[in-house]
Image (cartoon, grey):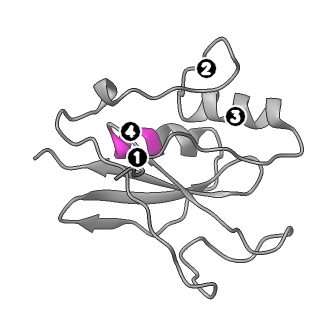
Amino acid sequence: MARVTGIGGVFLRSKDPKALTAWYAEHLHIALTSYGGITFSWKDEVPATTGSTSWAAFPATTTYFGPTGEHGPQQAMINYRVDDLDALLVELAAKAVWIDPKREDAPYGKFAWINDCDGNRVELWQPLAK
């Protein structure tokens, strides 16, 4: 049977796509490719053997995506795997990026949340080595 095997892409709507793309390149160190987007390869997993992608549906009333912003409730949230959450948060704070004071340590990794320059809530996840 044919089936979905993973997430093939994440696409964000923005009033200024170039500025949003530049924000992600500057603040989250995501290397842009020649087509102006970003390509992640599973070979980039850090630490090794932690590569995974989650998919989940949340109730319409969830507050997990943050409070309702000026454009209404956020309909989606992206979770980015990071290699050093604490160091990245220090960098982001130095650049005045909004960081949620909440942190979460789970058996499968550490979590933090930020807002990008468009006000989208973004989840950062540092997986634990297996």
Total marks placed = 4
Residue extending farthest to the bottom is 61
Q: What is the quadrant of residue 20 in the picture? A: top right
Question: What is the CA distance from the residue labelled 2 to the residue labelled 3?
Answer: 11 Å
The Cα atoms of the two marked residues, 2 and 4, are separated by: 21 Å
Per the rendering, the mark at residue 6 is 1
Q: Nearer the viewer, mark 4 or mark 1?
A: 1
- Disc 2 secondary structure class: loop
CB under 8 Å between callouts 2 and 4?
no
Residue at x 18% of width, y 32% of height? 48
Q: Earlier in the sequence, mark 2 or mark 1?
A: 1
Q: Which residues are magenta?
A: 84-89
Q: Which mark is residue 107?
A: none
Q: Position of residue 119 (x, y in %)?
A: 74, 57
Decide if residue 110 is on the left or right side of residue 20. left
Q: Residue furthest left?
A: 130
Closer to us: mark 2 or mark 4?
2
Callout 1: few (<14), some (14-19), or many (20+) C-alpha neighbours within 10 Å? few
